Amino acid sequence: MSARDVTPGGQSAPPVVAPATTVQPGRGSQVLREIVSGNALLSVLAVLVALVLGGVLIGAADPHVQKAAGYLFARPGDFLQALGNAVGGAYSALFQGAVYDFGADNFARAIRPLTETLTVSVPLIFAGLGLGIGFQAGLFNIGAQGQIILGGIFGGYVGFAMHLPPGLHLLLALIGAMLGGAIWASIAGVLKARTGAHEVIVTIMLNNIAIYLIAYVLTLKAFKRPGSTNPISPFIDSSAQYPLLLGSGFRLHAGFLLALAAAVGVWWLMNRSTLGFTFRAVGANPSAARTAGMSVTSTYIWVMAIAGALAGLGGSAQVLGTERVLTAGVAASFGFDAITVALLGRSKPLGIVLAGVLFGALRAGGFAMQARTGTPIDVVLVVQSLIVLLIAAPPLVRSIFRLPGPGALAVKGVQA
Amino acid sequence: MKLELRGITKRFGSLVANDAIDLVVEPGEIHALLGENGAGKSTLMNVLYGFYDPDAGQILIDDEVVDFDGPGDAMAAGIGMVHQHFMLVPVFTVAENVVLGHEPTGVAGLIDLPKARALVKEISDRFGFHVDPDAVIEDLTVGAQQRVEIIKALSRHAEVLILDEPTAVLTPQETDELIAIMRQLKEAGTSIVFITHKLREVRAVADRITVIRRGAVVGSVPPSTSERELASMMVGRSVELGVVKDVATPGDVTFSVRDLTVIDVAGVRQVDQVEFDVARGEIFAIAGVQGNGQTELTETILGLTQPATGSITLDGEELVGRSVKEVLRAGVGYVPEDRSSDGLVSAFTVAENLILDRYDQPPFARGLALDPALARASAVDRVDEFDVRCGSVDDLASTLSGGNQQKVVLAREMSRPLRLLLASQPTRGLDVGSIEFVHQRIVAERDVGTPVLIVSTELDEVLGLADRIAVMYRGRIVGTVAANTNRDVLGLMMAGVPHDEAVAQAATHRTMLGEADEAAGDSSEGDS
């Protein structure tokens, strides 16, 4: 029987079949699907290429390299040496500032950079996990920034305004943070489900509203630190703080363990639960999901609520762990970096944890690099941006490394 | 003009789409290229038309080797192509479309529209196409649009015309007109390459039939070859063309649609006061040309669309107002008309697709937790039972051929106790072998006493499967007729002609396909 036609494998789709009337999914969700379905190798290569290009920039900005370039053809060795020194020096400083400081006089100081990296990675992992769920469900939620802020406001308020026994206090503060993020994200979810308003637009707007909301909230009596004119909250009660993991010498707190647990939880949710099955089905093919009896609209609301709760936990990591106080800058740029983290991690929990740690390292190491070698920390920003660029353009990375494309469809497009 | 292909080979990666194909089209010949979906017909024609470079082989025109760099070269050499999906600008007029790409220009480079009109009129009159040069494409019927495509090709002096699955979108009567046009063109000396997988049509019109299977020529035969022989050449084994089934023994009516009207967002009545009943143990088919309200009807039954008025009852229970999930839970098995967009999640594995509408119910779910191991085990059984050809149940649905994808949908929908099977275009785009299998399963479902509702635009399928037939036209049911109704009568009803009138018209105006049908009937009687 010839049901297999001439298609022995999936790799090369038969070039003769033209799907006549497939419903065109939105361009955005197609791009999302491409990004989510890409493989880990592409992520690693994207990071490598970005680091190489970052190295070029470091070299270009280095005065010694510039000087040596002046007599490049007379003594090319000088140029290469200067380049090697500049790039090697900068990246070595970056590594020592992010992982292990070889120059430190004791072990505790030597591993201090690594603990800083992990501390910084906590909000990135939380928010990245939330965004990853959205990406897998076909929602381009870029509102993590606002959701982190709302998580910070809710969790922080419970943390400093209420006074409860240890344990219970932290638990309640965490619930508050999740609730804050979930409510904020659900606004976008409900609007999408009820009116079809595009989540990208709505979440961007909600980010801005959140930024001004926290600035306003910190002027209120309920939030302002007594006796201070600065927009800063009272300190969080110690009963509502994440316990420190390595003693008072390090900032690393139990939020990191909670983030790892959340990653496992998200893996279970997406791969082993009925809810996650619905999310993935709606993300991959909403019309088939609807035809199979799933409610696409309530899925949107659920996905946004869960993503918001996770981002809210990211806010709690800042307020109840790292900073222990609520300020207008509580979210820094974590919400935006988390988008890159989720994309780099291909929306998979393990990938997001690894990408979150990498970005934590870039951020933590960037300061050391600037301090030790004078290389501007902006290089880190450039590297991060290049990663986004390369992930958004898989064909570019493929062509750099001459990887095979996703199916031999180079001559497609004439079958109409 | 004599066209010859010698040893054409085209590979896509490891896939050999065309394997050393030889083909000779004599001047003034209608040459049918017969093969299943994916056999390599369209690839071959795209090579001929200059879209693809062959990996090996030559194209000869009047015994001289030619080399096409693109469609422009092929057109200049006198080859015209009418694609399955028309390449027309819907908001342009016929004349504008015909000259698109090589517009006659006058003073200061302005388009000389009168000249374009005259060109269209001349060709249209020569062949009796009755096409108005000033009509806007989107206002024309599909058949008329196809004639515009043919005019376009002829206006570029095509001596060999390639028609790619030209009848897929036509009503039987329009097909008939097309066949007449093909014969006229042949009289005028134009050669035609007619690509199709429909046996009946090739026998009615072709002078020579070349059968392609798995990228290679199986043989070249005269049109007197029987349908059964052609089919076995196409598929590579003997196949049952008709549907083998016993006479239906209808039981009680358990599914009823009453006064159903569906109005879409634009305010158009897509379904207009439709009423019918389906009894247990019968296959009730709704025939009609695509876009006459069948899609809206099935979506309303499933609960995807809410009707303006009317009721749908299954075993006495009202389905209108229920959610899709509730309708499926009530025992409705639903095979959507477009499996790739509505039936499957192509990024999911076969196993996941097999539980797509049952994943949240025991035994596959316990509370919130899925049981992937059980889903896999059950999938292995389903794949076995429905003969789904896949490497493993963990393969993505997108790696399966169309026939196997459809089997996955059927396996899912038919592996739970059904109180109604609703299948829309159950065999669209499938090869002969898969069609046979799908039809057998549907008949088997009927035979266990399930009411079966089939919606199909393929008259062959309707005639083969149905125990009773309703014809839908512009949202209304034109009439409900017996299964053995004449093909010509059904064709006229599909164009909106009421039953009695259709019978009268069909008696005086025979179609060529109808005649070919009878001839085939005679010869097959002779065989047995």
Image: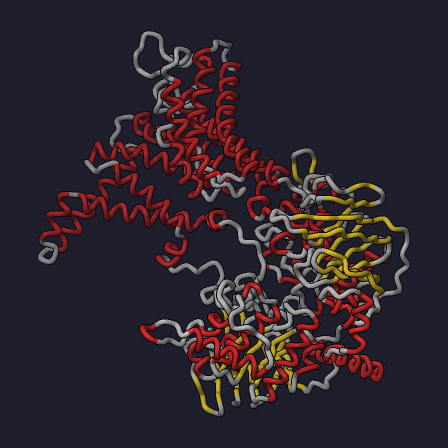
* Left or right of A6 on screen, residue A145: left
Q: Is residue B107 visible?
A: yes
Is the N terminus of chain A in the top left, top right, bottom left or bottom right quadrant? bottom right
Residue B38 position, x and y percent, is 60, 69
x then y, percent, for residue B510: 76, 78
Image point (56%, 47%), residue name = A284
Q: Residue furthest front?
A: B114
What is the quadrant of residue B233 in the picture?
Answer: bottom right
* A368 vs B475, nearest the viewer: B475
Percent of width and height locating residue B335:
71, 54
Residue sitting at 66 percent across and 39 percent down? B370
A369 and B491: which is toward the camera? B491
In the image, is B317 to the left or to the right of A341? right
Judge left or right: residue A46 versus residue A366: right
* Res A152 quadrant in image: top left
**Residue B41 seen in the current view:** no
Q: Position of residue B122 (x, y in %)?
A: 52, 82
* Colour basis: secondary structure
Task: Count how many numbered circles sit on residues in the image.
Answer: 0
Q: Nearer the viewer, residue B514 or B104?
A: B104
- The quarter holding residue B135 reads bottom right
